[in-house]
Every structure is written in C-alpha cells, then in structure tokens.
Amino acid sequence: MDRLANWADLTEAAPSCGTGSALRCDRAEIAHFHTERDVDLHLTTWAVRRFEQDLGSATAVQLVPGAQWVTVRLEVDTDIDLLMTLVSLALRAHQRCPVPRDAPPARCTAARTAVPAQPTAAERRPGG
C-alpha cells in the first residue's frame, strides 16, 4: 500500500466495508487492503467485462460474478507488479466511466464468494 499511497491520484481512506485500509481517487474507492496479502480492486463493470478472460487466467486474481471488484492475492513479487498494473487500469476505468457522486458505493468482494475452480473431468464422473 505504501507504494500506491504515493501516487498523485490516490489518497488513503477508510474502506466502506470497514475492514483494513483503502485508497481512493477523487470519485471512488479504488483498493481495499483487507490483509497484507488480500487486496480488492474496484475495476468497474466495464473493465471487468473487457478484461475478464485475462483476469480469469491470472492465478493471483479472483473474480466474483457480477462484481465490479476483483481480489488480488499477493504471494510472489510478480503479484505486486500485477497489482500495480491493475490499480492503473482501475484509475483509467474510473476516468472513462466515472461513478456519479450520488451513487451508492459498490461493495468490495470481502464478504462475497469467488468463482469456484471448475471441476476436472475426473471429478465430474460419478465416483470420481
């Protein structure tokens, strides 16, 4: 969070979910740091739809159906690089499609369930 808190477009804030800490831009919350390793990013509906295949193939990213937020699990250095890239994407997405000031805040994924991994063919077979 320290590296991102120095970005000109981000300021530290209390997260709307009440867990951890947050960064926001002038119109919306961008990131919630729920733990040292779990970060929720507010990418917007447009960005999630636009990059859904890429996000879904990233092992560090968890998608929640219908959510404007994704969770990034920070386990290795490349996950931090991915986080930086996705925060930049989130800022661009909020510039492209700003959230109206009177809109209720979009809920982060902290209390939601991520998309479960698809069962393998062996697991789908009876008795498998």
Image: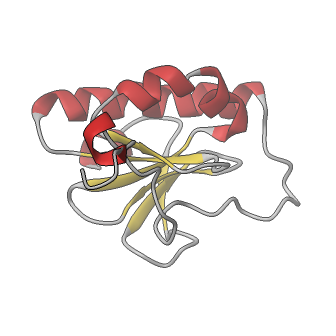
Q: Position of residue 110 (x, y in %)?
A: 46, 67
Residue at the image position 11 percent from the left and 37 percent from the top: 76
Give the answer, above or below, for where 40 lies relative to 9.
Answer: below
Q: Residue furthest front?
A: 126
Query: Which color mode does the image show?
Result: secondary structure
The residue under the point 37% across, 25% down is 57
Residue 37's place in the image compared with 56, above or below, is below
Residue 10: image x %, image y %? Answer: 50, 43
Residue at 55% across / 60% down in the picture?
A: 108
| Depth check, front residue: 14 or 20 | 20
Please report the residue visible at 26 percent of the width from the left and 55 percent of the height from the top: 127
User: Where residue 119 sits in the image (x, y, percent)?
Assistant: 35, 44
Please name whichever residue, 96 or 107, is drawn nearer the observer in this view of the structure.
107
Q: In this view, which residue lies farthest toward the bottom? A: 18
Q: Quarter of the image holding residue 56?
A: top left
For residue 19, above or below residue 10: below
In this rendering, position of residue 95 left or right of residue 15: right
Tell me if residue 80 comes above or below residue 108 in the rendering: above
* Residue situated in front as seen by the camera: 2 or 51: 51
Furthest-left residue in view? 76
